[in-house]
């Protein structure tokens, strides 16, 4: 009988302590390493998708009204360049070559080497050198641009000046780092 009372008493203490532990620790706020201070749910979702989700022209509205393009912060007319950018091609973006470098990336969605470079660039957006703009061009739907620059196969890069004049053309850069080394 005494053994049963001790067993019941020990079991009761374990239940009370265990329940108190779970009540206390179960209600404590948990930190989520994937959520950084000030990060929006859209940014978290984009990060979880491996950077595969791009908002139109990589533009995101910050809560304070400032615009972000890649890691470029624009407030009014002032612009602070933290790192370069990777975004969809638009002819007016060639003007960025006046104060930096612009590289056109002719890639096809079905091209495995194009996909690999695209994935590497997206995974390393913060490593794009400051002043470098990489403009993504759909190889299959850009006949005029392919003709202008003599592009005959996908996975071709073209560095241009602000008027769109070819400075250098190359293929085969398998990573963002290799691409950046080619820029003159």
Image (cartoon, rainbow, N blue to C red):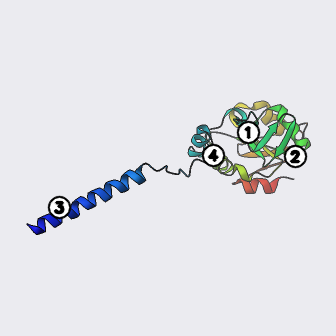
Whether the residues at callouts 3 and 2 have beta carbons within 8 Å, the answer is no
Q: Residue furthest left?
A: 1
Residue at 56% across / 52% down in the picture? 33
Q: CA distance from mark 1 to mark 4?
A: 15 Å
Disc number at residue 8?
A: 3
Q: Secondary structure at mark 2?
A: loop
Q: Nearer the viewer, residue 4 or 94?
A: 4
| Mark 3 vs mark 2: in front | 3
Q: Nearer the viewer, residue 15 or 100?
A: 15
With 19 as the anchor, is 2 left or right in this view? left
Q: Quadrant of residue 41?
A: top right
For label 1, the residue is 87
For label 2, the residue is 100
Whether the residues at callouts 1 and 4 have beta carbons within 8 Å, the answer is no
For label 4, the residue is 115
Whether the residues at callouts 1 and 2 have beta carbons within 8 Å, the answer is no
Q: Quadrant of residue 51?
A: top right
């Amino acid at each position: 009988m005494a053994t049963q009372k001790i067993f019941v008493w020990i079991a009761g203490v374990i239940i009370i302590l265990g329940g108190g532990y779970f009540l206390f620790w179960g209600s404590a706020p948990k930190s989520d390493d994937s959520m950084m201070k000030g990060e929006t749910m859209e940014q978290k979702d984009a990060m979880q998708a491996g950077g595969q989700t791009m908002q139109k022209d990589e533009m995101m509205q910050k809560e304070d009204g400032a615009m972000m393009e890649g890691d470029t912060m624009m407030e009014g007319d002032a612009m602070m360049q933290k790192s370069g950018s990777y975004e969809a091609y638009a002819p007016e973006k060639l003007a960025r070559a006046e104060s930096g470098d612009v590289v056109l990336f002719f890639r096809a969605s079905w091209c495995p080497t194009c996909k690999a470079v695209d994935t590497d660039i997206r995974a390393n957006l913060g490593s794009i050198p400051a002043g470098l703009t990489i403009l993504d061009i759909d190889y299959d739907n850009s006949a005029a641009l392919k003709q202008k620059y003599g592009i005959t196969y996908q996975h071709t890069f073209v560095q241009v000046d602000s008027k769109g004049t070819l400075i250098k053309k190359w293929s085969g850069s398998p990573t963002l780092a290799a691409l950046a080394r080619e820029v003159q």
